[in-house]
Amino acid sequence: MPEALTRIPTHAAIIVDGNRRWAKNRGLPASFGHKAGFDRLKE
């Protein structure tokens, strides 16, 4: 089997998109959107 198929990743990245827009659409500061995105990620 090729090595690329047998190696297990040691980390992963999650790109959250739309948190700033979410907050802006609700009339909130961007930091509220970032917090809401982080809280949702933990779920």
Image (cartoon, rainbow, N blue to C red):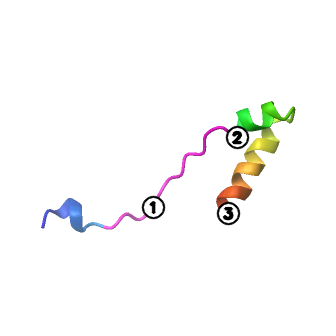
Q: Quadrant of the N terminus?
A: bottom left
Find the residue positioned furthest to the left: 1
Q: CA distance from mark 1 to mark 3?
A: 17 Å
Q: Secondary structure at mark 1?
A: loop
Q: Position of residue 17 (x, y in %)?
A: 61, 40
Work out whether mark 1 precedes mark 3 in sequence or the reverse, and give the earlier one.
1
Q: Residues within 10 Å of mark 1 (few under 14, many from 20)?
A: few
Task: Tell me which corner region of the image, top left, top right, bottom left or bottom right, holds residue 10.
Answer: bottom left
In the image: residue 1, left or right of residue 5: left
Query: Type of residue at label 1?
Result: His
Task: Tell me which corner region of the image, top left, top right, bottom left or bottom right, holds residue 9.
Answer: bottom left
Residue nearest the observer in this picture, 31 or 21: 21
Q: CA distance from mark 1 to mark 2?
A: 23 Å
In the picture of the structure, the residue carrying the numbered disc 1 is 11
Q: Secondary structure at mark 3?
A: helix
Which residues lie in the magenta part?
A: 8-18
In the image: residue 8, left or right of residue 23: left
Q: Secondary structure at mark 2?
A: helix
Q: Position of residue 42 (x, y in %)?
A: 67, 63
Q: Residue at x 73, y 45 (%)?
A: 34
Instruction: Please tell me whether the stretch drawn in magenta is mainly helix, strand or loop.
Output: loop
In the picture of the structure, the residue carrying the numbered disc 3 is 42
Q: Residue at x 76, y 42 (%)?
A: 33
In the picture of the structure, the residue carrying the numbered disc 2 is 19
Q: Position of residue 19 (x, y in %)?
A: 70, 40
Residue nearest the observer in this picture, 34 or 11: 34
Q: Residue at x 72, y 33 (%)?
A: 21
